[in-house]
Amino acid sequence: MLNEPDQHAKLLGEFIRAQRQMANLSLRQLSAMTAVSNPYLSQIERGMHQPSVRVLKSIASALNLSAEAMLEQAGLLEETGPAADSAADDGNATENALNADKRLTPTQKRALISVYRSYIEANESGSS
């Protein structure tokens, strides 16, 4: 079993990989957009490294995510605002459905919920 820092790194890497794939970007393209080396990005995605705040902000910018969402995913910020409020709402059918789906692993559920929350946050802030 992974210790907590290793688990955070693994979850963060999976989140970044999912966001990159949804943006239809290769590692090489993301590397060029972030000025972070391709091998280092690969290691981050595999959960082998905890990137610095600078690197996280650069990745967030390239993936059109808020820096706050990326830092929350990395475990560097507490969840606040509308996304945290909706997570606490028992009426949130989408998150409840994802959490109830036995076909998904806990890691996959967390990644999907993070992506869902980032879209909700973006829509509430008026960006598309």
Image (cartoon, rainbow, N blue to C red):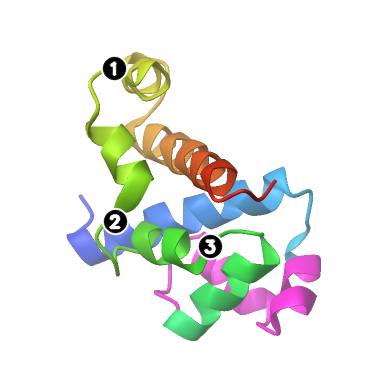
Classify 11 as above or below 31: above
The residue wearing badge 1 is 91
Q: Earlier in the sequence, mark 1 or mark 3?
A: 3
Bounds of the magenta segment: 28-52
Residue 46, position in %: x, y?
A: 50, 60
Residue 54 visible in image: yes
Q: CA distance from mark 2 to mark 1?
A: 29 Å
Check disc 1 and give the amino acid type. Gly
Given residues 84 and 34, the one toward you in this image is 84
Left/right of residue 68 with respect to residue 34 in the rendered view: left
Look at the numbered discs 2 and 3 and tell me whether their residues touch, using CB distance below 8 Å. no
SS label for mark 2: helix
Q: Residue at x 69, y 67 (%)?
A: 62
Classify 118 as above or below 4: above
Q: Residue at x 29, y 17 (%)?
A: 91
The residue wearing badge 3 is 66
Look at the numbered discs 2 and 1 and tell me whether their residues touch, using CB distance below 8 Å. no
Check disc 2 and give the amino acid type. Gln
Residue 31, position in %: x, y?
A: 73, 75
**Predominant secondary structure in magenta?**
helix
Instruction: Classify mark 2: residues with Cα within 10 Å, few (<14), some (14-19) or many (20+).
Output: some
SS label for mark 1: loop
SS label for mark 3: loop
Q: CA distance from mark 1 to mark 3?
A: 25 Å
The residue wearing badge 2 is 7
